[in-house]
Structure formats: C-alpha cells, structure tokens
Image: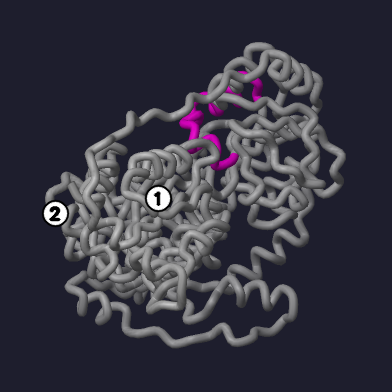
C-alpha cells in the first residue's frame, strides 16, 4: 500500500474520528486515502479554525484532536491553535504536508523548516523521512500528546514519501498509567493540612484532565476546606457545593483572593502555573504549599512547595483525606455569600445596553447544566470566569494559558460534534468573533446547530479596560462592525439583534431551539468594567 494509506490506517488505529483541515497539493495522497477511511474529514475555511477545533475536541474527549494542512502558509496558519492546545494542555496532533525530500535541502517554493517551527510549541515534532517509520512516529505523537501533561505534537509528511509503497505494520495502542502517590508524601501532606488554621484549595485544569472532580468535591466536603478554581477548571467542584468559592484570577484583590490572603496552607490540585501566576496569589511567599498533581511542580520563586504529592490525582486526594483532620471552614462563608449576592444583583436589571452580569444571568438560566459554553478571549471572558456558574467540568471552556482570541466559534463546532445532544454556545466579543467568523459556513455545511452570542462594544474591550485603569485614556482600540444580522443571514444562519434588555431571554430561548446556526448581536455596557475595578480596589476582606 501507499505510505499515505498506512498513515491513515495508523490514525484509525489511534481511534481518530475526525480530521479538521484544508486540502492542498502536498497532502493529495493523504486526502485520497481518507476517502476509503472511517475517519470523517471536516473541511474548514482557515487552518487556524482547524487547529482550534482539534484543540477543543481534545479538551472534551481526552483524546488527541487532529488537524491537517498543506505546507508553508497552510502550516503556519495552524501554529496559533497548536500553541493554544500545547500551553493549555489539550491533546492534539497536527499534520502538515511538505515538499518532497529532494527539495528540502535548498531554497524552494513554500518550503519552511516546519519541524523547527513547531518544535517550540509542541511536545514532539518529527518528519516522516522514511515510510517505514510511519507507525512509530504516529504512535509516539499520540502517546506524548495524550500523556500528562497532555499537549500538542506535530508530524511533517513530505509528498514523495506519502506516495511510496510500504508494508502494513500497525503498533498496539497503549498509554502509560499514572503512578501511585508515595505514602510518605501523602502522610506529610495530611499532617500539614491537619495542622493548618486556614487551608484553602486552588484547583486547576489538571483536575479536569484527570477526571478527578468527584474526588475533589469529596475531599473538600470531608475536610471542610474551601475551593477556588482557575478559569480553566470551572465546574471541577459544583458551584452549589458549600465549599465552592468560584474562580480565582480576575484580580489580585478579589473576593476569592481574600481567602488566599488569610490562608496559611494552600493546597494546589492539578494546578498549572500558566493558568494563574503564583505571584498574584502568593505575594509574600510565606505560605505552605502542597502540590498534588501528575507531574512535579514547575520552579517558581512564588511557588515554593512544602510537600509534593506526585501521582494519580484521584488516589492522592482519597488517601490524603483519609489521614487528615477536618476543619471548621466558617471563615470562608462571607466570601461565598458576597459572590452569590453579586451574581444575583443584576438579574432583573433592564438598562440598555445590557450589563455583563445580566447577559450571564440570562444565559445561565436558558441553558441546561450540562450544556456547553465555549468562551473567547476578551473582557467578556473575565465576566464569564467570575459569574457564570458551573456544576460540571468542561461545561464552560476558557482558554487561559495561551489565551488566544478566535477560539470560540471553531471550538463550538468541535463541541457540537462531540456532544450532538447538548446545546453549545460560543460566547465571544465582536473582535474575537470576526477573527474566525468564516467557520460559520463550516457549521452550516456540516449541519451543526450552535448559538453565537456576540458581546458587541465596537472595541477591544479588555485592552480598553486596562488602558483606562493604567492611563485613564484609550489608544487605538475602537473599530466598526458589520451588520451582524445581515452577516449571519448571508451564510444562511439566523440573525438576532438585542434592542431591549427584556428581549434577551426570549431571543436565547428561540436561538437554542433552532436547528441551524444562530447569531445574537448583543450590545454590552462595559462601563461595568470600571465599576468592578473600583469595587475590587476598595475591597476589604470580611473578618
């Protein structure tokens, strides 16, 4: 068989369901081999969209999402989404066609050193320079992408290699198992927790990846320790849980940070430093940190680990809980009460443009608890991270390691493929929406109903927020938008414009019931950003 056919067989062997990408001259053999495969190729409108789709597929399934491009500009267009997956620890395998090996030694049309380009943003970057190594390279790429900490891998496939004849040779698919937590470290962590006066838990994205949400909730319940989650770990403990404090990371002097300021022991579970810089929540470097994760802690001056428990997170939590003494926990009740009060404050507000708090209240009310929101990057992300309640993990996906704009629309497409029975909403700013809005056509063509909720302020709102905070004036952040309703209809989608705040719940309900793509243009009142900044700046932690 052709090497390209063997390559596709290897992808099938890894359980690949979808390949997101764009055909090109240098991947012609691969595209032809896909016609005889069980793998479904999702033709996208930009390679960045393909990478974001693979990124979100990986987050939701814990299996590597796969994206494909041709050489040169096709491959470079993948890089942002691949970097996002790698830094956010989503399993992904990117594949790019390449010129024949007889052209790689010299200046040649569209030829770049792709393995060199992808090496800094992946866990593994390799070129298929011999057809006989295809099974090994594919297996290694998936093994590394799907092993903790999960991330991205890249494979370059020269076109002359793809056309060569080769024998069928598939390798067995196995993944390494998580090690058991060392008993000595478990005992040391339990002793430190038992002797603490005001412990607090910081739960990170590793809890989602390890499927340890139930164990985390049980741990907090048994030991009566409050839990703050990172943006990417929303839902790892149900918000209704009495120990849940919500998301940390909006600003250092936040409600949740009051808990960190008072804590003497901070228990970091599945926490990736890229999610929320330690200097923001451990300024004094004087607290005892317990690190519970699959991997040893990253070195950081503000993250000095007193006890590191490395191994299966689920088992670590269960065993530490068995040896630890429960706490009172009453000191965090005022923090939770104030956050809940803030979430309820604007639920009946009818001022227009719509306040961020009101948009979130109406969206949360319209959705079932297991429906999925894919949040883009911008000012709306900060509000969603703070105020959108989650009862389950992976129901509000936020990119916060690489934090790339443009992920929401393609990400929502992938989410709908993974969970066709759930509603999926892309929550995006107008700027982020326009970065990958071309993928509306992909959703329409693939018959994937999603709702796109645009927070419209005709500005790079988060940057404007920061400019006003720092300089009290703005610089080059304003722009004009198209008519989003007409834009939606030009694709064959349904378009809605919110003209009264009171209409938003009805519009959301109708959009969610549609069997096609629905786009909602919702003007947002970002004057609330400055009000929130002022509120947090004068916050006094309750005693």
Image: 367 above or below 495: above
Q: Is residue 121 visible?
A: yes
**In the picture provided, is 175 more to the left or to the right than 490?**
right
Determine the CA span between mark 2 and mark 1.
20 Å
Q: At 68% from the left edge and 77% from the top edge, which residue is drawn?
A: 467
Image: 216 above or below 428: above
User: Colour scheme in the image?
Assistant: one colour
The quarter of the picture where residue 77 lies is bottom left
Q: At 35% from the left edge and 68% from the top edge, which residue is drawn?
A: 99
**Residue span colored magenta:** 204-224
Q: Give the crowd class for mark 2: few <14, some 14-19, many >=20 residues within 10 Å.
A: few
Residue 458 within the segment the image draws in magenta:
no
Q: Give the crowd class for mark 1: few <14, some 14-19, many >=20 residues within 10 Å.
A: many
Q: At 63% from the left edge and 12% from the top edge, which residue is drawn?
A: 322
Q: Quadrant of the C terminus?
A: top right
**In the picture provided, is 413 more to the left or to the right than 331?**
left
Given contact means CB atoms under 8 Å apart, are the residues at marks 2 and 1 in contact?
no
- Residue at the spot of label 2: 35
Which structural element holds mark 2?
loop
Give how far across and how far down residue 42 sits, in percent: 23, 58
> In front: 102, or 362?
102
Which structural element holds mark 1?
strand
> In front: 57, or 9?
9
- Residue at the spot of label 1: 93
Give how far across and how far down residue 465 sits, in percent: 63, 73
Q: Is residue 59 visible?
A: no
> In front: 108, or 342?
108
Give how far across and how far down residue 488 sits, in percent: 25, 75
Q: Earlier in the sequence, mark 2 or mark 1?
A: 2
């Amino acid at each position: 068989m052709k090497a390209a056919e063997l390559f596709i067989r290897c992808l099938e062997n890894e359980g690949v369901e979808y390949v997101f990408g764009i055909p090109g001259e240098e991947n012609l053999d691969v595209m032809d081999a896909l016609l005889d495969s069980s793998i479904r190729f999702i033709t996208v409108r930009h390679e960045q969209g393909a990478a974001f789709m693979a990124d979100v597929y990986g987050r939701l399934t814990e299996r590597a999402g796969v994206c494909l491009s041709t050489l040169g500009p096709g491959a470079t267009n993948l890089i942002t989404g691949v970097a996002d997956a790698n830094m956010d620890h989503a399993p992904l395998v990117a594949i790019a066609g390449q010129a024949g090996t007889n052209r790689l030694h010299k200046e040649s049309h569209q030829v770049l050193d792709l393995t060199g380009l992808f090496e800094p943003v992946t866990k593994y970057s390799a070129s298929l320079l011999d057809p006989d190594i295809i099974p090994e390279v594919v297996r290694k790429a998936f093994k590394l992408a799907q092993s903790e900490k999960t991330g991205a891998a890249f494979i370059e496939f020269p076109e002359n290699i793809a056309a060569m004849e080769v024998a069928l040779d598939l390798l067995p698919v196995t993944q390494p198992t998580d090690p058991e937590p060392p008993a000595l470290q478990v005992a040391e962590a339990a002793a430190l927790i038992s002797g603490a006066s005001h412990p607090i838990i910081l739960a990170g994205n590793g809890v989602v990846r390890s499927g340890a949400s139930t164990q985390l909730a049980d741990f907090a319940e048994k030991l009566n320790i409050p839990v703050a989650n990172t943006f990417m770990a929303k839902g790892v403990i149900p918000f209704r849980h009495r120990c849940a404090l919500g998301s940390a990371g909006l600003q250092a002097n936040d409600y949740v940070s009051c808990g960190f300021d008072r804590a003497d022991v901070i228990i970091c579970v599945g926490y990736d430093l890229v999610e929320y810089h330690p200097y923001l929540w451990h300024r004094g470097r004087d607290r005892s940190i317990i690190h519970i994760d699959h991997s040893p802690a990253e070195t950081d001056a503000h993250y000095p680990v007193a006890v590191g428990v490395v191994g299966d997170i689920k088992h670590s939590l269960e065993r530490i809980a068995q040896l630890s003494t429960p706490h009172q926990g009453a000191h965090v009740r005022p923090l939770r009460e104030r956050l809940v009060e803030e979430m309820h404050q604007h639920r009946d507000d009818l001022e227009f443009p719509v306040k961020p708090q009101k948009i979130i209240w109406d969206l949360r009310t319209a959705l079932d608890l297991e429906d999925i929101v894919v949040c883009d990057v911008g000012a709306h992300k900060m509000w969603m991270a703070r105020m959108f309640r989650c009862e389950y993990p992976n129901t509000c996906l936020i990119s916060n390691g690489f934090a790339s704009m443009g992920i929401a629309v393609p990400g929502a497409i992938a989410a709908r493929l993974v969970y066709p029975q759930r509603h999926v909403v892309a929550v995006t700013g107008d700027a982020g929406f326009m970065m990958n809005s071309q993928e509306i056509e992909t959703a329409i063509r693939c018959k994937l109903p999603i709702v796109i909720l645009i927070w419209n302020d005709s500005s790079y709102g988060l940057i404007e927020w920061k400019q006003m905070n720092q300089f009290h004036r703005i610089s080059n952040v304003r722009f004009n938008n198209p008519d989003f309703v007409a834009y939606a209809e030009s694709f064959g989608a349904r378009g809605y414009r919110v003209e009264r705040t009171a209409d938003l719940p009805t519009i959301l309900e109708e959009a969610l019931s549609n069997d096609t793509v629905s786009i909602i243009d919702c003007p947002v009142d970002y004057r609330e950003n400055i009000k929130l900044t002022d509120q947090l700046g004068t916050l006094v932690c309750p005693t």
